[in-house]
């Protein structure tokens, strides 16, 4: 039996879709700004592995993650309203980056934050057809 081929998405479409995403911070993550840097307070997961580990070793309730200046700049803009395209333009202007360099940096940054569950992404809802 042959596997169904996935439709290929050309690079221009993939880029357009990426730039249209709106990153939003995880509401469970508290953060503050200290000396121009975003300091994230990540709550400890509450699963059986952590509970077992906590029997033998004290496990803190949360941990701190300090973002670098560029990461902090982007983190401030992850409010669910700004599109990645807008964040890219702001990075280009603020840090004198090229468009491609800013987009690749954002792509990697969001990939890392997304894997860790620090942010999620919202897309535009397609207009529904009224009859």
Image (tube, helix red, strand yellow):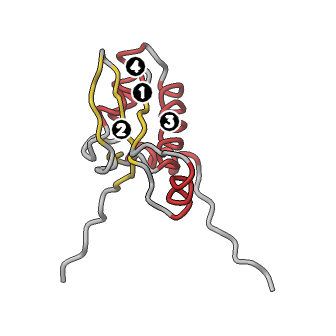
Q: Say left or right for 129 vs 88.
A: left
Q: Which residue is mark 1?
A: 66
Earlier-in-chain disc, 2 versus 3: 2
Q: Which residue is mark 4?
A: 69
Earlier-in-chain disc, 2 versus 4: 2
Element under label 2?
A: strand
Residue at image x 42%, y 22%? 70
Question: Is the residue marked by circle 3 packed among few (<14), some (14-19), or many (20+) residues within 10 Å?
Answer: some
Earlier-in-chain disc, 3 versus 4: 4
Of 83 and 5, which appears nearest the observer?
83
Q: Position of residue 5 (x, y in %)?
A: 69, 71
Closer to us: mark 3 or mark 1? 1
Quadrant for residue 92, please give it.
top left
**Where, quadrant-wise, is the N terminus in this rendering?**
bottom right
Furthest-bottom residue in view? 1
Residue at image x 63%, y 60%? 8
Mark 3 touches mark 1? (CB < 8 Å): no
**Where, quadrant-wise, is the C terminus in this rendering?**
bottom left
Earlier-in-chain disc, 1 versus 2: 2
Q: Which mark is residue 109?
A: 3
Q: Which mark is residue 41?
A: 2
Question: Is the residue marked by circle 4 packed among few (<14), some (14-19), or many (20+) residues within 10 Å?
Answer: few
């Amino acid at each position: 039996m042959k596997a169904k081929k996935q439709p290929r998405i050309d690079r221009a479409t993939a880029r357009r879709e990426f730039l249209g995403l709106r990153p939003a911070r995880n509401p469970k993550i508290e953060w503050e700004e200290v000396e121009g840097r975003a300091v994230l307070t990540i709550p400890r997961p509450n699963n059986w592995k952590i509970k077992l580990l906590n029997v033998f070793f004290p496990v803190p309730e949360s941990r701190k993650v300090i973002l670098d200046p560029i990461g902090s700049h982007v983190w401030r803009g992850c409010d669910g309203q700004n599109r990645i395209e807008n964040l890219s333009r702001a990075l280009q202007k603020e840090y004198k980056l090229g468009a491609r360099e800013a987009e690749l940096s954002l792509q990697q940054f969001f990939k890392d934050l997304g894997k860790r569950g620090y942010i999620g992404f919202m897309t535009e809802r397609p207009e529904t057809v009224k009859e």
